[in-house]
Amino acid sequence: MDTTTQNFDVIVVGGGIIGCNVAHALCERGQKVAVIEAASLCSGTSTNSFSWINGTSKVNSEAYHRLNASGLHAYHELARRFGEQRIGLYRCGTLEWSSPGEHSQLADLRHKAERLKAWDYPVAWVTQAELSAMEPHVVFREGAEGLFALADPWLDVPVFVSFLAERIRELGGQVWDDTPVEELLVDDDGTVTGVRIANGEVTAPQVVLATGPNTPDVLTELTGYEGFRARFPMIRSPGLLVTTPPVTDRALITHILYDADTHVHLRPGSSGGLLLGSDETDGLIDEDSGVDAIRSAATRLLEMTQQMLTSFSGAALLDECSFRIGIRAVPADGDSIVGPLPSAEGLFVVCTHSGVTMGPAIGDLTAQALLSGQVPEPIVPFGLERFQF
């Protein structure tokens, strides 16, 4: 690939769900964009995600909730334009519940439902009888109640990223994978002018860095400033996901499920099995865990799921399951990072947890910011200026 003479309006470094959404939004606005990914598209955090699209779990901050909710609305609009199958969207809704024995947990869940309703997010409060009617194979504890988030879907992320890459190319953009960026190009005034890769220089007046949990390392490598690696305000948070084989001749569940008392979450998988996760088992592993530690945590997760589902074989399925550890990029204060890097004209950074949910919204807002030179109001609270590093 000869890139020496290629010039673009914007370069996006990172070919995950955030980077491809940013590039797609720019291409739809007539910009000439290059996506440059060091490995293969969607090979990192994006594909190792529970991929639950929601504003349901984000209620601590109204601004952060609305950013997530706008992502949900954006997926519905993409499905209207292109169809659910093409973008990999599965509409099903979320059930989250607690029981009277967990007084504080149930109170928190009621408070969440009230807050979501006040923010016009589509939720309904449901009784144990209603929960059981919607999910007859789930064992709900006596007196369980909860919320039903009607609009929440889940996403087949590789399908969606492939769709975005196809659209980017259709709209005149370029998508290069297996192409590490070696250096950030900067002129004498400190303004970013592009990047250097093995085959030459790729120039653009704007560069967007969307490299997820690798952001501190990538910033350090591209700028030569070691302080980014040590002090960039981001935490690498590992999460274990277990995918079961097709488990029965009937659908054990049809919704995204979250047991607020045990923190087990599960959903249908695209292969006919289940995708499982839990805050508890996340705490049993780290990104360097060996096979034995991962299998032990997976066994615990399968056992917890068996207590929730009738006709589920639990740990007996261990050797038929696949295990993934996703490394989530969690900004230090829990909110997204979306905005220009201070003192680096032409460099825009996006780093966030819940990137699957917010991808289309962040892509659209980032495109607006780059083209107008003004940060749109919904992402003003999420700039890097709030940190000292």
Image (cartoon, rainbow, N blue to C red):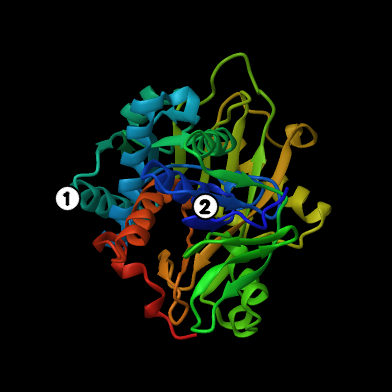
Amino acid type, callout 1: Ala
Q: Is residue 241 left or right of 370 when viewed as pictured? A: right
Looking at the picture, how far across and down is residue 293, in whole percent?
78, 56
Secondary structure under tag 1 reads helix
Q: How far apart are marks 2 and 1 (CA)?
A: 32 Å
Secondary structure under tag 2 reads helix
User: Between 55 and 207, which is closer to the camera in this rendering?
Assistant: 207
Q: Which residue is drawn at 74% across and 57% down?
A: 199
Residue identifier under label 2:
19
Q: Residue at x 38, y 24 (%)?
A: 134
Looking at the picture, how far across and down is residue 91, in whole percent?
40, 28
Q: Is residue 235 left or right of 78 when viewed as pictured? A: right
Q: Can residue 303 be seen in this view?
A: yes
Q: Residue furthest left?
A: 118
Query: Label 2 neighbourhood size at 10 Å, few (<14), some (14-19), many (20+)?
Result: many
Query: Label 1 neighbourhood size at 10 Å, few (<14), some (14-19), many (20+)?
Result: few
Looking at the picture, how far across and down is residue 281, in whole percent?
63, 54
Amino acid type, callout 2: Gly
User: Between 92 and 80, which is closer to the camera in this rendering?
Assistant: 80
Looking at the picture, how far across and down is residue 349, in whole percent?
48, 66
Q: Which residue is drawn at 45% across and 51% down?
A: 22
Residue identifier under label 1:
118
Q: Which of marks 2 and 1 is nearer the N terminus?
A: 2
Asked if the residue under mark 1 is in contact with the one under mark 2, i.e. CB atoms within 8 Å, the reply is no
Closer to the observer: label 2 or label 1? Answer: 2
Q: Can residue 261 be seen in this view?
A: no
Position of 321 relative to 387 (above/below): above
Q: Which residue is drawn at 71% across and 54% down?
A: 179
